[in-house]
Every structure is written in structure tokens, then in C-alpha cells.
Image (cartoon, helix red, strand yellow):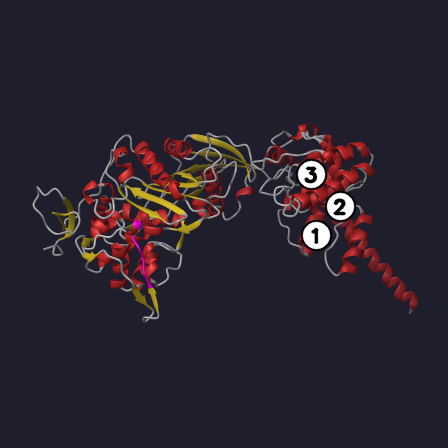
Amino acid sequence: MKRKLLRLVIAMVSFIWILIGTGFNYLRRMPAPDVFLNTYVVFYDIHGEPFLEEVIPNRRQFAPLDEISSYVIDGFIATEDRNFWEHHGFYYPSILRSVIANVRAGDHVQGGSTITQQYARNLMVDFERTVARKLREAAYTIRLEESHDKAGILEGYLNTINFGHGVYGIGDAAQFYFGVDAYDLTLAQASILVGIPKGPSVYSPLNHYENARERQLVVLDAMVETEKINAFEKEAALAKTLTFIGRRPVDASINYYFVDAVLREAEQLLDETLSSYDELRIFTTLDPNIQMAVNDAVDTNIADGSALQSVVVVMEPETGHVLALSGGSDYGTSQFNRALFAERQVGSLMKPILYIAALEHGFNPSTAFISRPTTFMYNGGEHTYTPGNYMDLYAFEEISMANALAVSDNIFAVKTHDFLGMHVLKEMAARFGISAEIDEVPSAALGVTNVNMMEMTEAYGVFANEGRKVTHRFVTQIKDDQEVLVDNRPVNVEQVQVVSITDTFILNEMMTGMFNLVNNNHLAATGLSIIPQLTHRYAGKTGSTDTDSWMIGYTPDLVTTVWVGYDDNVKIGEDAVIAKLIWADVMEDALHQGSRWFREPGDVVSIPVDARNGLPVDAMSPRKVNLYFQQGNEPY
């Protein structure tokens, strides 16, 4: 019986050994893994001209091994894998020590990965701690060791490490943290960088300086132990005062906010497989002349080094083509694309959406309410709300909806909201594509809700597109070296008619009022400060809170959104006017060859009315303004 059991054990061990050997030989014969994971991409503008060539997914400076400081190389080997040059991908004593430590702790407290294993993990992108992932990592490790020499593995590893803040690779890390090339890193600088990948969120010297210094000491001690430096050099490095930059060098002629938005959309259109292609040609909606106008307007109106942030989106309302975009004032300082991801209070930008709903419910531009301090009751009288106008200025008489829109009277807006029923604005905002939940409270009419900036641009695109909803796009086509992979052109795309052409035309005419001095009343027309700069006919609206300043204006050809404010919600103060200045600069530059206006529907009529109360007046009246009304709903 014992002999049979022994033979069975020997047979099983032999089978497992043969299986392991077969698997190992199979992995050795497999093609070498792609150690760069790069996709070469050429970006084309809306005219079909190339404007940028990039290596994706990361804009890495690939640093050859002989162009990397020896302090970096020695530091990583001393700290991460002292037997790197001798082992064949796995160092079993380290693996055994980590297994014992983790079993004792009942958790993952220690790793035993070699540099090759870490590089394999970087190539796989997937960092989940699963058995399947560990097996794939082992397979990649074997293939790397069989397909590449040690120098090649080390070079690839150093160019794919995560250094935090979206920075990968030693070349970009050297520039991001210290503004130098990888070859020029000092021992003090290199030992800081070597410590970061252990935990980029924990050891970033920008966010956790003390942690970074503690880790630097670990790195320097390891280099002393491996005799790469001496104790004197260690102490000198620790004593060195370092200056951290924390920003990427970027090509000022390229707006990388736009490029990032293109890559994000392209990834979605390719079902998250962009990096599986060797080469791609991405045709975009970028109008380089308008983008240049945006860049110039931001640079002109926001001082260098200012913490004030800005967003600019220029969209073609009929197609949804984003012709230009800026997601912040300085990409080198902050890569967060506010145009796509930020949500801010919109203030009075919500009023046109309320007033188009009012037109649907029978209002007309001359519908009047009294502008005076008012307290509103809601929730069955349980709560009250007392809004105020800018500077507490009121007409103390009836003003028309057109005048209220032109001077942005808050009392009129809340009275309209209350009169219609507070569900109406919520429903109309949803029709316009605003995903934020609009509370059924009086203050909703004054834009207290945080709304995504691109959604707000699309919402105003409905007004500019004769009441039809269109979705923004950055990409028109994607091709590889053989065929068209994606055709995203808006040809024959069905557009949803959100509101009627007639109501939209009437509102668009009302929204020219902010640029007309005749509308000055108890409050000034909100476009007063930029009227001298404008040479075209525009519809538009401002929006402001203590911390946000917006301007959205449009013609049938372009809708442009501008926001300025501070990321930490500091009060904006006198800087609020900058949104209007940027908007005026961009629109005037973009439309320098001329502009169109909206076609007049057949069921509207133009009537001269008093600019303040909306009542019909003689054509020679000094307070006359021509407003449009749907036939049968004229003032009397």
C-alpha cells in the first residue's frame, strides 16, 4: 500500500513538473510582448490638415538608458531589486519572505516582485489582485526575460513607472518635478524620484513632503549598503534643499485640453481599444484659427501666474462640432479639463430656459410683473425665500419679460417660476439635456444648481440651432493604415426638436437685449461693458454668483461659452468682467469674415414696444424696441 501511494505521489509530482516545464517552454516560444504600449497618432484639424503627432496613451519622453542619471539606475536597483542582473525574472528568496510575512499579517503587507515583474505589471495596465492577473504577470515576466536583455528591460521599466500626478516614466518625472532632463538629475533629486513609485499618492513631495523625505532616506541607505554611494554623499544629498516645480513643459502652440478631449472621445468610439492599434489618424473638429483666438483671449485677459481659471468652448450649433476648447488657464499647471468635468453654479444662465418654458405656456415678450422686493412662500407655506436684485435695485413698477431678461432682474424670474409651477423649469432643463437635478424651490430660477459646463453649452446650442438638440463632438473620423474605423460625422443624424422654431426665434430676439442700451432701466443691460467691442448681432446671457462668472452668446454659426472662477471657490470680485471680455474677443475674431442671423418664421410679427414695460409705442419713441410675437399673442 505504501509503495503504491509513493508511486502515485511520484507520478503526480512528475506530471506537475512536466506541465510546468511545458508551459514554461510554450511561454518562451511566444512572441515578445510589446514593451512600449505606444500608439502613433496623427491628429487632423477640421480642414484635414495635420496639427499634432503624438505617442499615446502617455505623452512620454522616452529616455534611453544611457540618457538616464546613474543615480536613478543605481537607486532603483538598490531599493527594488538588488539581484536584478543575476536572476531570470523571479527572485525566489524574496518571494518566499513576502509570502511568510503576508501569511503572518493576514494581509498583503510586503511584496517580493523583481523589476521584471513590476515592468510586466506596468505593461498589463491591470492592477487587480487576482489569481488570473498574477498568472498573466508571471507569463509576461518569463516572456520579457526570454525576449529582451537586462538593459532593455531596465530601460522599459524606468520609462513606464508611475510617478504620480499623471506622470509616467523617468523622463517626464524629471521635467515635472525638477524641470531637468533625466540625465541631469542629482543624487538628491534622483533619490526623491526613486522613492515615489512605492506609493505615488503617499510619497509625492508635492503633497506629502515629510513622507517623501522618509522614503528618500530609505533609498539613500540602500545605495550606501550596495556601495553605490558613500555616507558623505548620502548626508550631502539629505542636506540639499530641493525646489519642486510640479508642472509639465508643454508646446504653447497646442491646446492640450482639446487633445485630451479628442483622445477621450476616440477611446469611447473605439470601445476602449485605442492602445491596441500601432498607428491611427484621428480627424477632429478643431478650427485652428478659432483655437488660436481662444488661446490669445485667455492669455490677454488672465495674468500669468494668476490662480483664476477659465473655460472656453466654441461649438458649431448645427453639427455639435467643438471648434475650439480651453479647459483651464494653464495646462502646464493643471491638466484638469473643467470644460468636460467641472460643475458650477450657473446663476442667471438658467433664466432663458425658464423663459422659453414661459413662452410655451402663453407668455410673450411683453408679459409683465412688478419688480420690487418680494418674499415667496413654498412647500405649503412652511418656508419663505426673499431674493434680491443686483445692488438691491428695483423698478417698483411693471417691467416686461424682455426687459427683465436684458437687465437680469431676479424678482421677475422667481415670479415667473412661481407662476408656472416649479416643476416646469425642472422638466424644461431635462429636455435641454441638463442632467443635474433641479430642485423645485424658488431659488432654482436663479441658477443655484451646479451644472456641467459642456452640458450648459449644449443647452444654449438648442437656442442657436432653432430649437433642436445636438450633442457635442470632437472626432469626425478615425482611420488606421488600411481603413476607416469610425465615421462620426453628423451626416443625416436625426436632431430632436426640443422647443418650437417660433418660440426659439422669439427668445433669440429677446436675448439680443443685453447688448441694447435702450433696455437700461433700474438695472443696466448686462452686456453694457462690451457693447463698444461688438460688430455683429448676437444673442446672449450672463450668469454670475459670488464665485462664478459666465457668458454664453451665439449666432446661427457659433455658440461660445466662457466661465471664469477659482477652483477653491474664492469670491471672484472684480475679475467677473473677464468672462465677457474673453467672450467678446473670441466671437469677434471668429466671425471676422461675417455672420448670419436667424430666419424669421412665418407666424411671427414684429411690433414696436416700450423697452421697459413692453407696451406698444409709436415708432418714433426714444424707448422703442422691436420685439417679435407669435401671431394671435401680441400685446395690446
Establish if 317 lies above or below 373: above
Identify the disc placed on residue 25: 2
Query: How far apart are labels 2 and 1 at the CA level?
Result: 15 Å
Residue drawn at the location 39% of the way across and 43% of the way down: 573
Please say whether residue 207 is one of the residues in the magenta stretch.
no
Badge 2 marks a residue whose secondary structure is helix
Q: Quadrant of the C terminus?
A: bottom left
- Closer to the camera, 9 or 108? 108
Q: Position of residue 535 (x, y in %)?
A: 25, 33
Q: Position of residue 555 (x, y in %)?
A: 27, 41
Query: How far apart are labels 1 and 3 at the CA level?
Result: 32 Å
Badge 1 marks a residue whose secondary structure is helix
Badge 3 marks a residue whose secondary structure is helix
**Mark 2, residues whose alpha carbon is within 10 Å: few (<14), some, or many (≥20)?**
few
- Closer to the camera, 620 or 152? 620
Amino acid carrying label 3: it is Ile
Quarter of the image for residue 30 reads top right
Q: Residues in magenta?
A: 385-391
Residue drawn at the location 44% of the way across and 46% of the way down: 340
Q: Point out the tag, 2 or 1, that comes first from the N-terminus.
A: 2
Establish if 419 lies above or below 582: below
**Mark 3, residues whose alpha carbon is within 10 Å: few (<14), some, or many (≥20)?**
many
- Closer to the camera, 388 or 378? 388
Q: Is residue 114 visible?
A: yes
Q: Point out the tag, 2 or 3, that comes first from the N-terminus.
A: 2
Q: Nearer the viewer, mark 2 or mark 1?
A: 1
Whether the residues at callouts 1 and 3 have beta carbons within 8 Å, the answer is no
Identify the disc placed on residue 192: 3
Q: Position of residue 36 (x, y in %)?
A: 62, 37
Quarter of the image for residue 387 reads bottom left
Q: Position of residue 48 (x, y in %)?
A: 40, 32
Residue behind mark 1 = 135
